[in-house]
């Protein structure tokens, strides 16, 4: 059986104040990267905002980081 994808997450764009859906790739990455944080915690939202490019980071570099092989614990 294939696991169901996580439910969509919406954030408010800090420059336009418009509700924006977070791409599933970023949600999955932040679920993995912040494995011990709940989806309501600041650390999780920080991961979302960073990977959406709202902190001025280069979106191509962020995409490369998300696509690099992950280590297992």
Image: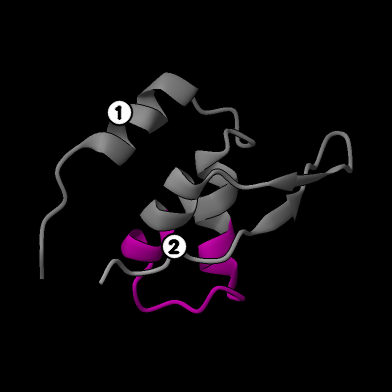
- With 46 as the anchor, is 25 left or right in this view? left
Which residue position is annotated with label 2? 5
Q: How many other residues sit within 10 Å of disc 1, few (<14), some (14-19) or many (≥20)?
A: few
| Residue found at x 57% / y 38% | 52
Which mark is in front, 1 or 2?
A: 2
What is the total number of numbered labels drawn onto the structure image?
Answer: 2
Which one is in front, 23 or 2? Answer: 2
- Element under disc 2: loop
Crowd band around label 2 with a 10 angstrom C-alpha radius: few (<14), some (14–19), many (20+): few
Name the residue at 59% across, 68% down.
42
Q: Above or below — where is 48 with respect to 65?
A: below
Residue at the image point whose x is 57% and y is 66% from the top: 7
Q: Is residue 32 magenta?
A: yes
Quadrant of the image containing the N terminus: bottom left
Query: Which region shows up in magenta?
Result: 30-45
Q: Compared to 24, does 2 lie above or below?
A: below
State how far apart marks 1 and 2 are (Cα).
22 Å
Give residue 56's quadrant in the image: top right
> Circle 1 sits in a helix, a strand or a loop, which is it?
helix
Where residue 68 sits in the image (x, y, percent)? 20, 37
Where does the image place residue 40, in percent across and percent down from the top left? 62, 76
Residue lying furthest right: 17
Instruction: Give the position of the C terminus as an image quadrant.
Output: bottom left
Disc number for residue 64: 1
Task: Determine which of the numbered discs, if any, sits on residue 9 in the image.
Answer: none
Mark found first going from the N terminus, 1 or 2? 2
């Amino acid at each position: 059986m294939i696991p169901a994808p996580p439910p969509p997450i919406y954030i408010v764009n800090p420059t336009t104040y418009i509700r924006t859906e977070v791409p599933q790739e970023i949600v999955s990455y932040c679920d993995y990267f912040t494995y011990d944080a709940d989806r309501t915690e600041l650390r999780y939202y920080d991961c979302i905002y960073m990977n959406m490019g709202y902190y001025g980071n280069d979106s191509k570099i962020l995409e490369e980081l998300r696509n690099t092989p992950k280590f297992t614990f």
